[in-house]
Amino acid sequence: MSVSKSVDLTRGPILRGILRFFIPIMLGTFFQQIYNTVDAIVVGRFVGKEALAAAGGGTAVYVNLLVGFFTGLASGSSIIVSHFYGASRKKELDNAVHTAIWISLFMGALMTAAGLLSASFALKIIGTPDTIFSASLSYLRIYFAGIIPMFVYNMGSGILRATGDSKSPLIILIIGALINVALDLLFVYTLALGVRGAALATVICETLCSVMVLLRMRRDKNFTFCIRRIRATPHIMRKMIRLGLPSGVQSSLYTVSNLLIQSNINSFGTDIIAAWAAYGRIDGFYWMTVNSFGQALTTFSGQNFGAGNIDRIKRGNSKSLVLMIFTALFFAVILNITGQHLYALFTADAAVISEGMAMLRYLSLFYVLYIPIEVFSGTVHGAGDTFRPMIITMLGVCLLRIVWLFSAVPLYRSVVTVMSCYPVTWGVTSLVFVVYYHSGKWLVHKQDD
């Protein structure tokens, strides 16, 4: 029996449609964040702050470097799928779906090899302390050994969302999150496997999620999916790579700058590393919300671009900007109110909690500066313009962040100076995105498809 849970974003009230599509994405990302956070909570509470630093410090940044590249690359596949869906081009849509899954399998194998071979070197490069090096390396090796199902799940979810179904990935993630919690407690607490247990729980859950998403795709009536038909259609693959590669490079450049930040954080000792790791989990609930909205806006823009509704894209962008500014202010307030209690979930160490709260109070003040980046880039990505946003982000965020770390930090070496690279680069890059969007140059891609 074929099923469809798609949302057609080319018609009806704009904001209601985007929100209807966004909420399942956000809830799905929430549950993904939950099982990432549970890893950290279980490890931090039952093993110790050294294990928390090992599972959530440099290891998390390094994982984001390779996984983030694929996620960006996969966005090109989602854009093409949304264009074909919006234009009702069924044959091309079928070919695009099978090509996208082929890309995920190929890139998964490539990233598995890259992650396993470079893990030790990467941890040394960012100055991982000897006290947590062995545990960090074990975590990475297990994590990367199971990365293929993670890529398949992410690509499959992106395909479903591009055709308007954001509910199925949500249901799958809820199931995965619940299983992950149970496995974390079993492997880390009961079997005392430490950070290796947390990594193993994540790999098992991603494998189950990948199987579920493939089964869901087989039953979708918007396209015809069959495992035996998984292969690359050359001209579609080239288009996917052309659109996705800039986003992949952009994501990697983001993470390279974050690796430099992590390297600076590592120089302040285990308490700061652990506080930064816990902050990343707490802070992640804000980022999952704005990033989920960015995904929804990209699909909205992509479907309407395929249907030729340019004015609708612009109106959606304006409404989204206002909504997300209020969202950023809400998170800044709520995280400051609840932050002390949230940190206590990760550790009972007073020094770690104190340092973490100082990080949260400072950076949450500037959340709103990031909003134009997510909203404007989401809109132009959906319209097929991914190269110039990459250049803007590379210069405004990545390069400027590196310049800050090598110029401002040596002058006044403190955690606050290191963290200040975030609001400085968010503000500058947001301003450039505003100018670029209003220039209208992103619409030149209208003739490409």
Image: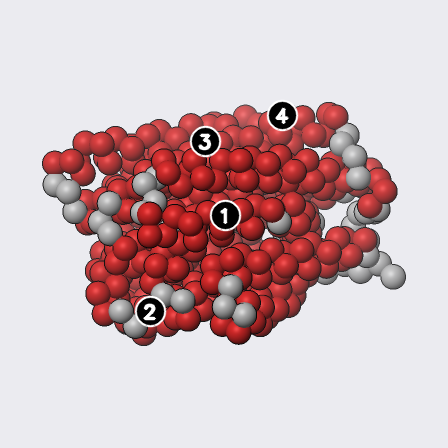
Q: Residues within 10 Å of mark 1 (few under 14, many from 20)?
A: many
| First-in-chain label (4 vs 2) | 2
| First-in-chain label (1 vs 2) | 1
Q: Amino acid at mark 4?
A: Gln
As measured in the structure, the alpha-carbon distance from the residue carrying label 3 to the one carrying label 4 is: 20 Å
As measured in the structure, the alpha-carbon distance from the residue carrying label 3 to the one carrying label 1 is: 28 Å
As measured in the structure, the alpha-carbon distance from the residue carrying label 3 to the one carrying label 2 is: 38 Å
Q: Residues within 10 Å of mark 3 (few under 14, many from 20)?
A: many
Q: Amino acid at mark 1?
A: Leu
Q: Amino acid at mark 2?
A: Thr
Residue that numbered label 3 is attached to: 390
Residue that numbered label 4 is attached to: 447
Residue that numbered label 1 is attached to: 140
Q: Residues within 10 Å of mark 2 (few under 14, many from 20)?
A: many
As measured in the structure, the alpha-carbon distance from the residue carrying label 4 to the one carrying label 2 is: 55 Å
Residue 162, can we see it?
Answer: no
Residue 347: image tag? 2
Q: Amino acid at mark 3?
A: Met
Give percent across and percent down for residue 194: 47, 63
Q: Nearer the viewer, mark 3 or mark 1?
A: 1
Q: Nearer the viewer, mark 4 or mark 2?
A: 2
Residue 17 relative to residue 255: left or right: right
Q: Residues within 10 Å of mark 4 (few under 14, many from 20)?
A: few
Q: Which element carries disc 2, helix, strand or loop?
A: loop
As measured in the structure, the alpha-carbon distance from the residue carrying label 1 to the one carrying label 2 is: 22 Å
**On the rendered image, what quadrant is the C terminus found in?**
top right
Q: Which element carries disc 3, helix, strand or loop?
A: helix
Q: Which element carries disc 4, helix, strand or loop?
A: helix
Q: Which element carries disc 1, helix, strand or loop?
A: helix
**Image height of 441 relative to 186, above or below:** above
